[in-house]
Each structure stands twice: as structure tokens, then as C-alpha cells.
């Protein structure tokens, strides 16, 4: 019997993978099974070597007490609205070339909790389920219909410094699953902002997301209380109930392939096979060795753009 066909009482009795720390319970399938134990956290936590404690509040709040938060008057909306009236991320169409920076209103803002610039901070809004896949270990799927552009979940864990990332990567074997993610945002003057997150031992349900060469989720850095971004996953298309949730581990934006990705696909390294089943499947999980060495000199031609890169070493997360 499919999970969605179960009696409501049976669903309530199932294990909550989120340990009641999310808005909604997260069930596991099949009943009576559960993933390997880990410490659950719905938000980032400070890990070894991190420059900034992700729990600190360092952003000032807006003063939109009597008027709605709108671009030009709200200090949190630097350029334009982040979300439409249906709480969908506005820039998620194929015309976008890179991820736009998103700043939400925070705990110091004077606007109400119902402000339309508060989306990711509201947490889970759809029923999700951790389930055992045929070939990829554990995965994550939705039990509800999710419209394109809606926030689905975060990828939360320990926020690490680069030396600690390298230390943990070096300890991995080819048989280990890698959960460490690197997000690199190219900002003005050729500067690169890096965020390293590891949910291996301390994390949330985002750690169960598998890779797909044709993903239905898109990861966007969203900042709320500080410059440490929440790694928010939004629906890149309409997602139907019981569909597995996935994103592209290589960090390509909206499945756009560039020369760097082509080199990554053809470098001949020993890599794990990809079982995503997509028509455009590259046959192997994305590989990138940059976590083994210092960050290269940034490309100043990327000034004024904000893009994200997820960098995965030889061990995949599937």
C-alpha cells in the first residue's frame, strides 16, 4: 500500500524523522524502518572553524510597521520582491541565468509574522517522507502537490571552516556517502563568499535528498538574520505526490550546462555511478576535487553576479 493510502491513524503512529522539531512530522517508509541515527536540527549550527555563528542575529530589522514590505521602502528588499502573492520564488524561470540573492525579513523587523517576505523561516509547509529507494539508499519525497516556486525544505547542518572540511573529506573512503556541501557566491570586485555545511552527524531532512541530472528542486542561498545563508530548496517545477525530491549536486543553475561541467563529466576520475534514471543522465555522480585544495583566484568577470556552486568530492550522497 502506498504511503498516501494509509489510514490517518497509521500515519500519526509512524516515526517522525524530524523528532517533532519541524512544523510537520516527517514519516519514514516502509513502516518499521528508519535511517541510521543522527542528531536532528532544523537550522544550521556552529561547527569547527566556522567564521560566524549561524545562530547570531547581526542584521538590523526593517521599520515597516504600518505599511507592507515593498522594494524602495523596506530595507530587507534590496532590489525587488523575492516572492509573489502565492509565496512562490519569483526568479525561477528558464530566463534566469544565475541565482539572485534573497534577503528575508528577520526577528528584529517590525513587520508582522504574515509578511510576504517571510517564507523560508516559516519552515515545512508540505508533508514529506524519507523512504528507502531501490538503488540509492534513502531518499526524500513529497506526499503533497508542490507548485513550482514554493519553498520545500532547507539543507541544514554544521557550518564549517575550510580546514575542517578538508580534514573530514580526507577521512572519507570511496564507500562513504558525502554530505558536505560548498556554496560559493561570486559578488562584487571578484570576491567569493563561501559557506560549507555538513549534515552528516547533525542535520535535517535535506541530507536525504538524492542527486538527479534532471532535478525538481533548486537550491538558493537565503539570508534572514545574518550573512550565513540558509540553503533553501525550492520547487523548480510542479511536483506531484509521491515524487522523489532531488537537486543537482554539481550546482548547475536550472540544469544549465557550462564548459566547466563538461570537463567535470569527461575527466575520467573514478566516480560513483548515478542512478537518477533521467534521460539526460551523465552516468556518474558529479565530481570536483576543489575541496582538496585552496580556492583558486576568483574570476573578476563575474562581478555583479551571484551564483551558487555545490562542490562534491569523489564520494556521492546517493
Image: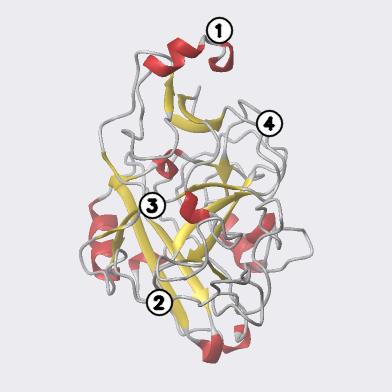
Mark earlier in primary sequence (2, 4): 2
What percent of the width, then of the height, locates residue 88? 67, 53
Callout 1 secondary element? loop
| Mark 1–mark 3 CB contact (< 8 Å) | no
Location of residue 101 by image quarter: bottom right
Q: Residue furthest front?
A: 66
Q: Which mark is residue 59?
A: 2
**Gap in angstroms between the C-alphas marked 2 and 4:** 37 Å
**Gap in angstroms between the C-alphas marked 1 and 3:** 31 Å
Per the image, the residue denoted by label 3 is: 156
Q: Mark 3, residues whose alpha carbon is within 10 Å: few (<14), some, or many (≥20)?
A: many
**Gap in angstroms between the C-alphas marked 4 and 1:** 18 Å
Callout 4 secondary element? loop
Mark earlier in primary sequence (1, 3): 1
Location of residue 241 by image quarter: top right
Q: Mark 1, residues whose alpha carbon is within 10 Å: few (<14), some, or many (≥20)?
A: few
Mark earlier in primary sequence (3, 4): 3
Amino acid at each position: 500500500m502506498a504511503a498516501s493510502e494509509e489510514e490517518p491513524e497509521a500515519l500519526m503512529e509512524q516515526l517522525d524523522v524530524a523528532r517533532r522539531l519541524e512544523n510537520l512530522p516527517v514519516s519514514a517508509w516502509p513502516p518499521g524502518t528508519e535511517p541510521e541515527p543522527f542528531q536532528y536540527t532544523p537550522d544550521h549550527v556552529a561547527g569547527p572553524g566556522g567564521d560566524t555563528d549561524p545562530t547570531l542575529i547581526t542584521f538590523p530589522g526593517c521599520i515597516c510597521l504600518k505599511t507592507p514590505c515593498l522594494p524602495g521602502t523596506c530595507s530587507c528588499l534590496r532590489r525587488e520582491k523575492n516572492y509573489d502573492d502565492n509565496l512562490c520564488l519569483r526568479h525561477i524561470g528558464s530566463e534566469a541565468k544565475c541565482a539572485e540573492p534573497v534577503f528575508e525579513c528577520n526577528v528584529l523587523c517590525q513587520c508582522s509574522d504574515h509578511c510576504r517576505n517571510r517564507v523560508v523561516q516559516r519552515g515545512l509547509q508540505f508533508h514529506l517522507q524519507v523512504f528507502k529507494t531501490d538503488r540509492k539508499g534513502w531518499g526524500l519525497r513529497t506526499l503533497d502537490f508542490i507548485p513550482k516556486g514554493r519553498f520545500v525544505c532547507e539543507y541544514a547542518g554544521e557550518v564549517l571552516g575550510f580546514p575542517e572540511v578538508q580534514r573530514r573529506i580526507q577521512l572519507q573512503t570511496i564507500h562513504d556517502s558525502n554530505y558536505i556541501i560548498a556554496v560559493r557566491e561570486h559578488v562584487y570586485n571578484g570576491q567569493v563568499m563561501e559557506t560549507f555545511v555538513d549534515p552528516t552527524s547533525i542535520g535535517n531532512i535535506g541530507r536525504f535528498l538524492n542527486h538527479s541530472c534532471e532535478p525538481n528542486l533548486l537550491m538558493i542561498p537565503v539570508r534572514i538574520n545574518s550573512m550565513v545563508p540558509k540553503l533553501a530548496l525550492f520547487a523548480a517545477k510542479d511536483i506531484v505526490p509521491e515524487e522523489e525530491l532531488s537537486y543537482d549536486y554539481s550546482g548547475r543553475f536550472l540544469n544549465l550546462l557550462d564548459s566547466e561541467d563538461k570537463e567535470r563529466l569527461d575527466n575520467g576520475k573514478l566516480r560513483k555511478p548515478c542512478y537518477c534514471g533521467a534521460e539526460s543522465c551523465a552516468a556518474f555522480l558529479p565530481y570536483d576535487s576543489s575541496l582538496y585544495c585552496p580556492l583558486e583566484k576568483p574570476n573578476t568577470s563575474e562581478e555583479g553576479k551571484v551564483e551558487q556552486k555545490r562542490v562534491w568530492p569523489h564520494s556521492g550522497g546517493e
